[in-house]
Amino acid sequence: MRIVRINARKAALIALCSGAPLAAQPAETPAPDEADEIIVTGRASRLYRANEISSGKLPADPLASPLVINVITEQLIADQGARDAQDLYRNIPGVSFFSYAGVTARGFRQEEIFYDGLRGDPYAGFSVPQLFNIERVEFLKGPAGMLYGPGAPGGLFNYITRKPTDRFFARVSGSLGNRDRYGGSAEINAPLGAGFAARAGVFFEDQDSFRVNAGSQTFIADGGLRYDFGPAQLTLQANHYDQDLAANRLRGIPADNDGNFLTTIRWNHNEPGDFLNLRSDVLQARLEAQPVQGVTFDATLRYNDALETQNYHEPQGLFDSDGDGVLDATIREFRDQARNQETWSFGTNLVWTAELGANVRNRVLVGYDRYTADFVFDSRQLRGRNRVTPGLPDPLSLFDPQYGQSDPATYNLPAMTRTLTGQRREGFYVLDEITVGPVIGVIGMRHDRFRDRSGTTSFSGSDETLRAGLVYRVTPEISLFGQYAQSFEPQAIASQNPLAGGPFAPTSGDIFEGGVRTGLWGGRLQSTLAVYQIRRRNILQADPRGDPGGDGVNDFVAFGEVTSKGFELDLAADITPDWVTTLAYAYNDTRITETLGTTPPTNSVGDRFANAPRHKLGFWTRYQFREPGIAIAFGGDHVSEQLSLDGQRVRPYMVFDASLIWERGPWRALVRVDNLFDKTYAASGFITRSGHFPGEPRTVFLEVTHRW
C-alpha cells in the first residue's frame, strides 16, 4: 500500500485550498522511507474565486448565469481583516460608501440588506452589519424585483451566514491594535452523531474611535443545530447582537465648497455621555428536502427583534461666534430616540429539474415570500441657540470644543412622541431556465402585494416585475450574457395623502445589460465585463401649480426619469500557484433625464446624483512564500470626485492597505494595516451643516488564531 506523507503545514495548505477544515490533517506522519512526498504547489489557488452563486435563487456556475453577482469569499474577508460591511466595498465594482450601512450602487442610493435570501436585517437604524458569523457576501447588481420584491434598482446585499456542517472545526482568536483595540473570538463546529451537527461562536471587540469621545464595543453570540433525517435537513440558528457605540450617532466634519475640512477630523459634535446602543436577537429555521428525484424544496422562517437607543447632539448650523468672518462653531440639537423593530420573514422555493434530451435541460422555480415588520419610534428633541442658554444645548466650537459643559440632565426636554409604522410585503414568483446545448435562456415573473401603515394612515397596492436573460457558452471557458429586469418601490406612506394628489403608483426601474464572462486557464482567471443602462421612473416631485385643488395641501406629481449608464470589470485570478489578485473597476454616469424643472428628485444635485462617483477602482493582491509560510497582501481603493447632497465637492481619494499573514500548522497570525499612508480624506458627503464623512486614518492590528 502506498502511503503519502504530508506534513502539518502542507496538510493545512491543502485543507485551505480545498475548503476542507484543518481537522482533516493526518494524526501521524509515516517515516520518510515509507512514503512518497506530495509537493503542494501553491497556497493561493482558489482563495478568492467563487464556483457557484446562489442569490439568483437557482444556484449556478457564474459562467451559466445572466445575472451579475459579486461574491466576497470568506478567505478574502479574513485576509483583509474585514470586521464590518464598510470594509468590503473596495471589492465590488460600482458600490461605494454613502452613509452608515447605506451605499451608492450603480449611481443609486441603496439600503436593501438580506440574510440567507430573506429580509430581516438585525442592524436596525444606524448600525453597520458585522461579519463575524458570515460565510460570504453576495451583491446582486441591478433591479431585483422579480427575485426579491420591492427595492432600489442598483442592487442588494445578501449575507450568507455560517451554518453547522458534518465536519469538526474549532478555532480561537485574539487581537490587539492601536487606539486601545482588543478583542477575541471562538468558534466550534462538531458532528454529534445520529444525524445531528452543531456550531457555536462568540465574538467581542472593543476599540476607541479616531473621533474624540467616540468608541465601539461589539459582542456577538451565534449558535446553530442541524438535523439530517435522510430526505431532508432542518437547520436552526440563533444570534444575539450587542453593540455599544460611545458618543454616537456620528455625523461628518464640516467642509467648504471645495471639499476641504474646516477642522480636524477628530472633532465630534457629540458629548462624552452620548451613545448609540443596539440589542438585536435573531431566530431562523430552514428546511431543505429532496422529496423525489429532480425536485428540491426549501423553506426558511426568520424572526428579528431589535432595539436601537440613541442620545446625541445633532449639528444644526454653522455660525461665526466672534465676528471675524470665519465659521467657527455650530448650533446643536439634542435628540433622544429609540427605535424598536420586530420582523418576520418567510420564503419557500420549489425547483424541478429535468433532462429533456441529449443536450436539453429545464429547471423551473416556483416560490413565495412574505415579510412583516412593525416599527416603534420614540423621540424627542431640543434645539439650542448660537449662544449658551440655560435649559438648552450649548453650541460647540469647531476649533476649541469644550466637552462636558452641556448636560442633557439640565435640558428643558419635551415629552416623548411615539410613531407606529408597519410594512407588509408578499410575493409569488415563477422562473424557468432552459438549456439547449450552449444556450441558456431564463424568463421569470413575479406578483407582489404590499401594505404600508403609519399611525391611522395606510396604503396598499400591488405590482408585477419581469426578468429575462440569455447566455451563450462560446466555449466552456467563455460566455456571453444579456438580461432585462425590472424593479419597483412603493412611494413613502407620507406621500400617499389624497389631499396631496395621492395615492401614487410605485417608482419603477428597469435594466438592459450585457457582457462577457471568462473562466480561463482551467478557471484560474474569472472575469466579468458588463455594460448596462438602468432607468428609474415615476419619481415624486412637487407640483409646480402648488395646490391646484385649493384644499390647503400642496400637491405632488409622479413624473420624471433618472438614467444610469456604465460599465464594470471584475476579475479574480491565480496568476501563479502562489500569487492571487482581484480587480474591481466601474465607470458610471447617473443623470436626471426627465423632470418638471421644479423640485428635483431626492439625492439629486443639479443633473447629477449625490455620492455617485464616475470612477471607482479597487484591487487586492496576495503572494505566498512557500517555505516560511508567509504571505504578503496589498490593496488599494480609489473613488473619483463626488458631490454631497448640498452640492459641495467631495474630493477624490486613493488609499492603500496591507496585510502580512503567517501560517504554520494550526497557527495563523495576521498583521493588518488600513490606510497605510495615513491619508486624510472624505469617504462621502452629506449636507452642509453636518459635513462630509471622514475616512478612517491609519489603523494597525494583530490577530492570532489557533485552529483544531
Image (cartoon, grey):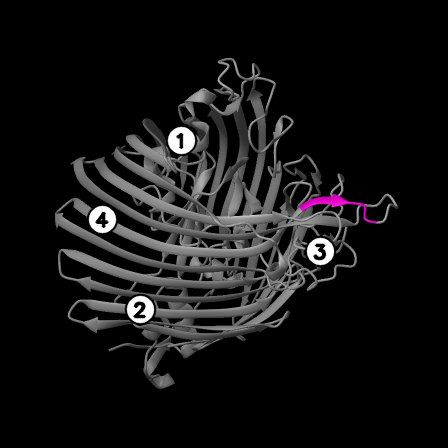
Q: Label 3: few (<14), some or many (≥20) within 10 Å?
A: many
Which quadrant is home to the N terminus? Answer: bottom left
Q: Can residue 164 be seen at all in this image of the molecule?
A: yes
User: Mark 2 sits on what residue?
Assistant: 199
Estimate the x, y position of residue 262 in percent, counting from the top left.
77, 49
Residues under numbered marks 3 and 4 in contact, where contact means CB atoms less than 8 Å apart: no
Disc number placed over residue 490 in the picture, else none? 1
Q: Can residue 44 be seen at all in this image of the molecule?
A: no
Disc number placed over residue 611 in the picture, else none? none
Residue 306 occupies quadrant: bottom left
In this rendering, would 327 be left or right of 585? Answer: right
Residue at screen point 56% across, 14% down: 545
Q: CA distance from mark 3 to mark 2?
A: 42 Å
Q: Nearer the viewer, residue 432 or 325?
A: 325
* Mark 2 secondary-structure assignment: strand
Location of residue 519 with respect to 632 vertically, above or below: above
Magenta stretch in the rendered image: 316-321
Estimate the x, y position of residue 286 in percent, counting from the top left.
24, 54
**Residue type at tag 3:** Ile
Q: CA distance from mark 2 to mark 1?
A: 39 Å
**Residue type at tag 2:** Arg
Q: Earlier in the sequence, mark 3 or mark 4?
A: 3
Q: Nearer the viewer, residue 416 or 366?
A: 416
Q: Nearer the viewer, residue 466 or 151?
A: 151
Q: Earlier in the sequence, mark 3 or mark 2?
A: 2
Residue 506 occupies quadrant: top left
Q: Earlier in the sequence, mark 1 or mark 3?
A: 3
Residues under numbered marks 2 and 1 in contact, where contact means CB atoms less than 8 Å apart: no
